Image: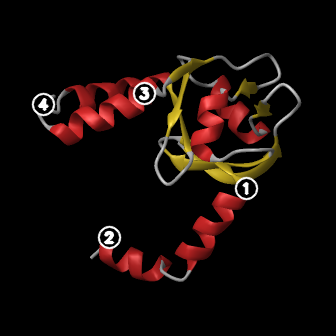
Amino acid sequence: MWYGQFFHTLDNKERIILPAKLRDKIKNLKKKKFFLTRGLDNCLFLFDQARWEQVEQKLNEIPFTKKESRAFNRLLFSGAQEIDLDTQGRITLPGYLKEVAKIERDVVIVGVGDRIEIWAKNVWAMFCDGSQDKFEEIAENLFE
């Protein structure tokens, strides 16, 4: 499981370094491959291979005859890339995914349980500002 919030900056080669706390968890993974794709709410989703395989399986169980299923699968899978971490724990963000997430330079890396999210710092700030006041209300609705 992935947790925490970390602030980083893209380097001149369009890379971000994953925080040390996350890299430590990666050392314990059996499969060290990752998949990066467009996420929801203007962020990117980074899945480890085991979780990505679960997501693939679940999405493949939804009938392709449903219009929403086709649209979602097209967007998620067409945006997906297999990502390798270099020896220093860096990943390169493809230009088209940077555009999707409105990432220019400053990013926030967020552990969200089963995935890592990568946000443009300003977009993350707007999300937090818009959601913080509703946090208790959301909790009540989800955990009744």
Between discs 3 and 4, the one toward the N terminus: 3
Residue located 35% across and 79% down the image: 140
Label 4 secondary element: loop
Q: Residue 95's image quarter?
A: top right
- Residue type at tag 4: Pro
Residue located 28% across and 36% down the image: 71
Q: Position of residue 88 (x, y in %)?
A: 83, 22
Q: Position of residue 78 (x, y in %)?
A: 43, 24
Foreground mark, 3 or 1?
A: 1
Instruction: Compute the Cα span from label 3 to label 1.
Output: 25 Å
89 relative position to 77: left or right: right
Q: Residue 91's image quarter?
A: top right
Q: Establish if 16 lies above or below 123.
A: above
Between discs 3 and 2, the one toward the N terminus: 3
Return the residue at label 4.
63
Return the residue at label 1.
121
Q: Position of residue 138 (x, y in %)?
A: 40, 75
138 relative position to 49: left or right: left
Label 2 secondary element: helix
Return the residue at label 3.
52
Instruction: Compute the Cα span from label 3 to label 2.
Output: 25 Å
Q: Are marks 2 and 1 in contact (CB under 8 Å)?
A: no
Q: Are marks 4 and 2 in contact (CB under 8 Å)?
A: no
Return the residue at label 2.
142
Q: In the rendered picture of this protein, how many numbered marks are placed on residues? A: 4
Residue located 66% across and 53% down the image: 4
- Residue type at tag 2: Leu
Label 3 secondary element: helix
Instruction: Compute the Cα span from label 3 to label 4.
Output: 19 Å
- Residue type at tag 1: Lys
- 133 or 144: nearer the eye? 133
Label 1 secondary element: helix
